[in-house]
Amino acid sequence: MLKLAKCFATYCYIGLLPKMPGTWGSIFAIPLAWTLYQLGKIPYAVAFILVTLLGVWASKVYSESVGNEDPDEVVIDEVAGILTVFFFVKPDPVTLFLSLILFRVIDIFKPPPIGLFEKIPHGVGIMVDDILAGVLTGVILLSLERFYGLI
């Protein structure tokens, strides 16, 4: 079970790439988000729920096995965060690029109250702050699109 948890928590070991594991996880989540979006809203939502639930389990199991509450190599949370963005805007070349940049900035700096949620123990805390970063990213991009016509 630990091998499966590690594989899933690190998003097929992408989180083990040298330097910037969260950025790598986010970059490799972009093609997944685009592909899932092409399948329709229901498959997209089901995939998001599965990634989130399995991410909670896998990140908890893996983080406990390495004795670190939020290991850098766990990047399934970035995948869930990127997937969250596209509940708000349609993925196209512009929104895919902007979502990656904006999501990473928000995820790194964790503006209030997002930072508070990462303190929730185990897998839930690992996952929920990135999902909230995805919500904020999606709301910002939707606002740019709707109110300013920039996207």
Image (cartoon, grey):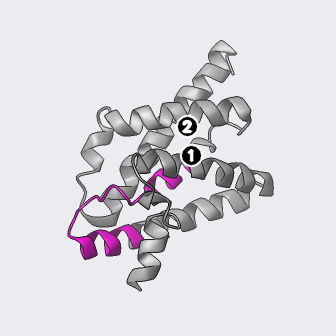
Query: Residue 65: percent from the left, percent from the top?
Result: 27, 76
At 62% from the left and 38% from the top, the residue drawn is: 88
The quarter of the picture where the N terminus appears is bottom left
Characterize the local packing of mark 2: few (<14), some (14-19) or many (20 or more) Cα atoms within 10 angstroms. Answer: some
Query: Residue 16: percent from the left, percent from the top?
Result: 42, 61
Magenta part of the chain: 58-83
The quarter of the picture where the C terminus appears is top right
Foreground pick, 23 / 129: 23
Disc 2 residue type (three-letter): Leu
Query: Residue 75: percent from the left, percent from the top?
Result: 44, 57
Q: Quadrant of residue 106?
A: top left
- Residue at the bottom extreme, as displayed: 1
At 74% from the left and 54% from the top, the residue drawn is: 35
Report the magenta stretch's main SS.
helix
At 41% from the left and 53% from the top, the residue drawn is: 18
At 59% from the left and 52% from the top, the residue drawn is: 29
- Residue assigned mark 2: 100
Residue 69 part of the magenta-drawn span: yes
Question: Do the CB atoms of the residues marked 2 and 1 lie less than 8 Å apart?
Answer: yes
Q: Can you say whether 43 is above or below 115 in the image?
A: below
* Horizontal arrangement in the rendering, residue 46 relative to residue 108 (left or right): right
- Residue assigned mark 1: 27
